[in-house]
Amino acid sequence: MGTLIWNARIYTPNEILSPGWIVVENRTISRLGHGQPPATEMQKAQEKLDAGQNHLLPGLMDLHIHGAMGFEFMDADLHAIEEIAQFLVQHGVTSFLAATWAAPQAALLKALDAIGNAYGRIRNGAALLGAYLEGPYMNPNRAGAQAIQFIRQATDHEEALSLIQHEMVKVVSLAPEFPENFWLIDACVSRGITVAAGHTSATYEQMQVAVERGVRLLTHCFNAMSPLHHREPGVVGAGLTMPELRCELIADNIHVHPVAQRILYQLRSCEGIVLISDSTRVTGLPDGQYILDNRPVQVKQGKVALLDGTLAGSGLTLEKALHNFVNATGAPLEEAILSASLYPARTIGIAHQKGSLEPGKDADLFLMDEDGNILFTMVEGRIVYTRD
């Protein structure tokens, strides 16, 4: 019984099986191997899919996405979350964290409750893994496109605890240079929540302290953080040199120049990088002017910016990020794919279940042709998208 996919180039964490075959049963990967499938597998399979020698890759995992197709998670609406999830599978994304931004406590709790309501209920889209709190405990001097009036420090313990105690929260991004936020780092770490440094002006020394406290991720490395300087390496210097940290990367060639991507890759390898989209509600929409977090933004040729030119998230999809990253760095696809699958899974502690094509793990995968077209996407053993 189950589904047999054969005649594929299968990307496992350690090798490419070409040709290879894989059997999916009861939402998980049960077996896979080199060459043509044994006759017994062909006989037992309920469904057989000839992959046509195309690339069978682990499903992409987007840890940092705010929205798409006119919807965002801050809308706090089940329909909006479903629409975003259904959009994602068209781009090879099989799981994601729903990201919020700086907002009043009530708005954040409403969004978290909506995310919790959607958890486990999405049938024809990417799997919702939880929430990513991007703020509100940031440095206002690094606000970027975040609403500066809602940026604050974690002085109100009751408020902050109400957020991080929500069962959906998997990542909290904050500015670690403020002593008011130290206790929050500790509280997150003790709860198994991944802590990221983001929208921060921390010095290199302050990042050393933050890493000692348990910070393990940089929110969109190079963006909205203290840059590398030869007398003060800053947060970027920490990301380039501290092995404890993984660096999120928006590989749209707008937020980060291809050469900067290459430097990051050469210093940290794919294992130190997590590709993200940081996409907003304008992703998937045509160029034009839209309203984002109650402010007008201009979308043109993939760039999303406030009218003053400040970048406001992206219009990126993760399979395009993967393509851009490979071209910018020269990383082989078999390595680069891990920055959008296995390493994100490790970052939030679910690599035992998701993130790679291995027996016993969820059957999250997609088939891609030589031109980069997504031919089909499977989420937890079900094909939820097929290219027309």
Image (tube, grey):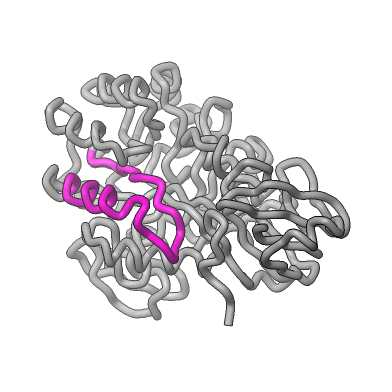
Residue 115 on the magenta segment: yes
Q: Residue 322 vs residue 35: left or right?
A: left
Q: Quadrant of residue 151?
A: top left
Answer yes or no: is residue 379 visible.
Answer: yes
Query: Residue 120: horizontal and vertical position, in percent?
Result: 37, 52
Query: Farthest residue in the bottom direction?
Result: 388
x then y, percent, for residue 293: 21, 61
Q: In the drawing, does residue 135 fall left or right of residue 299? A: left
Q: Position of residue 338 (x, y in %)?
A: 64, 46
Q: Nearer the viewer, residue 284 or 150?
A: 284
The residue at the point 33 percent across, 27 percent down is: 176
Magenta-span inclusion, residue 317:
no
> Is the residue 192 above or below the residue 129 in the image?
above
Visible residue check, residue 253: no
Residue at the (74%, 68%) spot, across then down: 51
Number of marks in picture: 0
Residue 272 locus on image (x, y percent): 59, 36
Q: From the viewer's perspective, is 245 left or right of 28?
A: left
332 shown above or below 303: above
If the image is split into quadrants, where does the C terminus sit?
bottom right
Q: Please determine whether, in this image, residue 287 is positioned above or below residue 54.
A: below
Please state if 236 lies on the left or on the right of 128 as rendered.
right
Residue sitting at x 57%, y 65%:
377
Tell me where the magenta segment starts and ends, as one range.
Answer: 108-136
Which residue occupies 41% across, 62% down?
A: 123
> What quarter of the picture does the N terminus occupy?
bottom right
Query: Where on the picture, by quarter, is residue 142?
Result: top left
